[in-house]
Image (spheres, grey):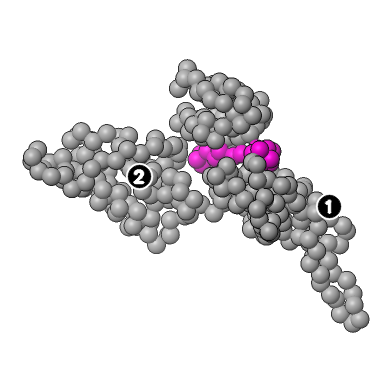
Amino acid sequence: MASEIVRYKADNGQDIEVTEQDVRDLMAANGNAMENVTSQEVKMFLRLCQSQRLNPFTRDAYIVKYGNQPASVIAGKDAFVKRATRNKRYRGHEAGITVLRRFKKNDGVQTVIDRREGSMMLPGEELVGGWAKVYLEGYECPIFEEVALKEYTAPDKYGKNGWSRMPATMIRKVALCHALREAFPEDLGGLYGAEEMDQARSEEPQPPRQQEDLRKPLWAEVANLKAHALALGTSEEGIVSWMAANITNPDGSPKSTRYYTAEEIIKLRDFLALNIANHEQPADAEPEYEDAEYAEPALADNDIKF
C-alpha cells in the first residue's frame, strides 16, 4: 500500500497524487498520532478522498484515532463551505448561536431565547445551541438547522477539541455542517465534521451487559464455523466483507465486532453455516444463495478475532 499512488482531481480541478506515506507524514505534521492507524484505515481514507474529490494536503479531510478505537475520517468545515459555494444553487448562508437571557421583571425573572448571528456571547448569558440557514435558488425558505449544545458536551468528552475553551464557536460549526449537508446531500452526504464525529463516537452502541454470557459461547461457535468454511475454500476477505455490509452501525459504517449483540453474532453464525452447506452440497445442486461482492472494509485494531 505504501507504494500505491492514488491519483484524482480535487474539487478545484487540481491534480492530486497521494500515497499512504504522504498521509502519515501529513497527519503527523499536523499533530495527529498515526502510530495505531492501520494501512487498511489509511487506504479507506484515500478512497474516500478520491471519491469525494477532497484534498488531504489542504486538510479538506484528515484522520483522527483515539487509542485503539477505529479511526475516524473527518472533513474540515472549510471543505463543507467550499463545496457548497461551488454548487450553482447556493445563495449564501447565515449561522450563529442560541442563548438564554434572563432579566428581572416585576417580582420575577423572565427568560428570553435569543438567536444571534456569529458566536459572541455576552456576560450573564447561557449558551444552549447553535443554528444555521442555507439559502438555495428555487427555495422560498432557507434550509434551517438548530442543534442543542447538551448533545455535544457529554461529561466524557467535555473539554476535548475546543469545547471547553470556545463552545459557542464549536456549536455554530456543528449547526452549519448540519444545514449544509441537508442542503447539498449529493455533495456532502457521508461527510462529518470533527465536532460531529466526537459526538457520534461517544454514542457508539455498547453490548448490553446481560448479553455478555450469551456472546461468549456464540463467538466460540462462530470461530469453529469460520475455520470449517475457510478449510472448504471460503476466503477471509469474503467473510469480512459480508460482515461489513450486513452488520452495521446506524450511520451505515461497519460495526466493530466487539460491539456485536448476541443477535448479530447469530446472524453471522447462520451466514457461515449456510456458506458451509453450499460448499458441501453436490456440485450439480442449485446453491441457496450467490456470493456477492462488497467493498473492502476497514478493520479496527480492537475487533474481536475469531
Residue 216 in sight: no
Q: Distance between the residues labelled 1 and 2?
A: 47 Å
Which amino acid type corresponds to the residue marked 2 in the rendered image? Met
**Vertical side of 51 occupied by 260: above or below:** below
Left/right of residue 190 with respect to residue 238 in the rendered view: right
| Depth check, front residue: 17 or 119 | 17
Which sits in the foreground, 249 or 34? 249
Give the residues in magenta. 68-86
- Seen at 50% across and 20% down, the residue is 5
* SS category of the residue bearing label 2: helix
Q: Is residue 196 magenta?
A: no
Residue under pointer 1: 120
Residue 281 can be seen in this image: yes
Residue 91 horizontal/vertical position (percent): 71, 47
| x and y, in percent, of residue 70 in the image | 50, 40
Q: Name the residue under label 2.
A: 243
Q: Is residue 214 above or below residue 219?
A: below
As drawn, 218 above or below 2:
below
